[in-house]
Amino acid sequence: QVKLRESGSGLVKPSQTLSLTCAVSGDSFPGGTYSWSWIRQTPEKGLQWIAYIYHDGVTYSNPSLRSRVSLSIDKSRNTFSLTMTAVTAADTAIYYCARATAAEYHDYWGQGALVTVSS
Amino acid sequence: QSALTQPASVSGSPGQSITISCTGTSSDVGRYNLVSWYQLRPGKAPRVIIYEVTRRPSGVSDRFSGSKSGKRASLTISGLQGDDEAEYYCCAYGGSTSLILFGGGTKLAVL
């Protein structure tokens, strides 16, 4: 069984940087065939995939967010992290971390972390 | 606006069947058999209920089924139950340019 748990800044000021970390338990991390995703949910847009990272650090991201997003992975701590720069109110969302399979679906998800962008 | 188009809401009575559509393009839904569906309930982690268009993860009821025709994928829930009330999202692989695309979500009400 794989478990994921998000943690990080719950309140971020506009123009500043959002940082979240996902702790993964279970024996599949980081796993050669899996990738590790960040996905967010807003009332206006629903779910939006942000990016994912592989065990070797290779990252793929949503073209609309690519310029502001970076991911990293720490195998020694069983964690992966998201950094998003220059945030605005539109980045207010529930942020989920999840495991993606080779068939491009997400089989395990965290409970989500609410991030609010406000001064 | 989301990349994939879903109806905002659907409703049904207990025991009935409903179908949620998900319309994409020839570059995503129409090109790859990599469509998945997720169930979101408040306070719970999202759950995959269909992957690779028609496949069900172990533990998911066979009341949930998926299909695809051209650029349109569908999720059917038969024998509606009260705890099916949730928000449902489709997701498709969009190739090396778009990667992972989600629909706007459909709220299911079981009346």
Image (cartoon, helix red, strand yellow):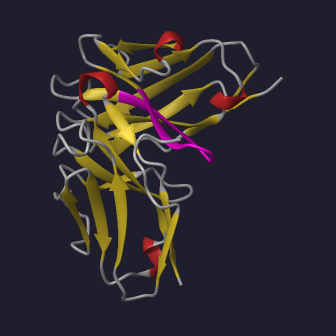
Q: Height in image: A85 above or below A96? A: above
**Does residue B9 appear left or right of residue A11 in this picture?**
left
Q: Height in image: A30 above or below B15? A: above
- Name which residue lies at 72% across and 28% down: A89
- Name which residue lies at 30% across and 28% down: B99
**Does residue A56 appear left or right of residue B12 in this picture?**
left
- Name which residue lies at 15% across and 27% down: A33
Residue B11: % across, % down: 49, 77
Q: Could you say which is closer to the camera, residue B66 or residue B84?
A: B66
**Does residue A9 appear left or right of residue A63 in this picture?**
right
- Name which residue lies at 50% across and 32% down: A6
Can residue A75 be seen?
no
Query: Is A44 within the magenta?
Result: yes
Q: Height in image: B53 above or below A55? A: below
**Does residue A90 appear left or right of residue B51 in this picture?**
right
Q: Could you say which is closer to the camera, residue B63 or residue B31?
A: B31
- By secondary structure, the bulk of the magenta-drawn segment is best described as strand
Residue A115: % across, % down: 65, 32
Q: Could you say which is closer to the camera, residue A29 or residue B25?
A: B25
Per the rendered image, the range of residues in magenta is: A37-50
Query: Is B37 within the magenta?
Result: no
Residue B37: % across, % down: 32, 54
Q: Quadrant of residue A101?
A: top left
Q: Quadrant of residue A22?
A: top left
Can residue B93 be seen?
yes
Residue A9: % across, % down: 65, 24
